[in-house]
Every structure is written in structure tokens, then in C-alpha cells.
Image: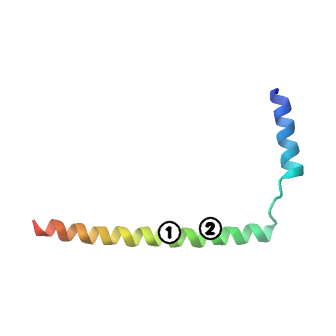
Amino acid sequence: MSFVENIKESYNELVHKVSWPSRNELAQSAVIVLIASIILALIVWLMDSCFESIMKFIYGLF
């Protein structure tokens, strides 16, 4: 398969076979990703704070 054929087939697939989301679907997905990212960041921050407290306690023993 040549490079040009590959480009033509890729274009054909993008135009005719891929189902693109609507603006509303895209906005809803973006909001879900944003909320999930915030929740994950809060979980990581909470774990970091807990480990920091534990390490300060352990270092305080010595």
C-alpha cells in the first residue's frame, strides 16, 4: 500500500465512517472529564496530605 493510498483511505474513513459527536455531546463529555479530574486531584491531594502527616509523625519520633 502506497503512502497516497493510505492518505486517501484515512480521509475516506474520517469523512464517511467516523461518527463525530454533536456540540452538546462534546460539552457534556468535557464537563464529565472536568469533574472526574477534579475528584481525582482531590483524592491525590488527600493521600499526599495523609502521607505527609504520617511521615512528619515518624520523623518526629527520632
- Pinpoint residue 34: horizontal percent, then vertical percent: 60, 69
Compare residues 23 and 15 and report the one nearer the observer.
Answer: 15
What secondary structure is marked by label 2? helix
Q: Which residue shows up at 67% across the image and 68% down it?
A: 30
Quarter of the image where one finds residue 59: bottom left
- Pinpoint residue 51: horizontal percent, then vertical percent: 30, 68
Q: Which residue shows up at 42% across the image and 67% down it?
A: 44
Q: Which residue shows up at 78% across the image and 71% down it?
A: 24
1 versus 21 height, above or below: above
Q: How many marks?
A: 2
Q: Work out which quarter of the rendered image holds the C terminus and state it.
A: bottom left
Instruction: Inspect the image, locate mark 1, and give the three-letter code of the amino acid beneath it.
Output: Leu
Q: Which residue is mark 2?
A: 33
Instruction: Inspect the image, locate mark 2, and give the three-letter code of the amino acid beneath it.
Output: Val
Q: Work out which quarter of the rendered image holds the N terminus and state it.
A: top right
The residue at the far left in this view is 62
The Cα atoms of the two marked residues, 1 and 2, are separated by 10 Å
- Left or right, 5 with reference to 38: right
12 versus 55 height, above or below: above
- Left or right, 38 with reference to 48: right
- Pinpoint residue 8: horizontal percent, then vertical percent: 87, 37
Quarter of the image where one finds residue 61: bottom left
- Pinpoint residue 36: horizontal percent, then vertical percent: 57, 70
Q: Residues within 10 Å of mark 2 (few under 14, many from 20)?
A: few
Lower position in the chain sequence, tag 1 or tag 2: 2
Q: Which mark is residue 40?
A: 1
48 versus 3 height, above or below: below
Assess whether mark 2 and mark 1 are in contact (beta carbons under 8 angstroms). Answer: no
Q: Which mark is residue 27?
A: none
Q: Which residue shows up at 55% across the image and 68% down it?
A: 37
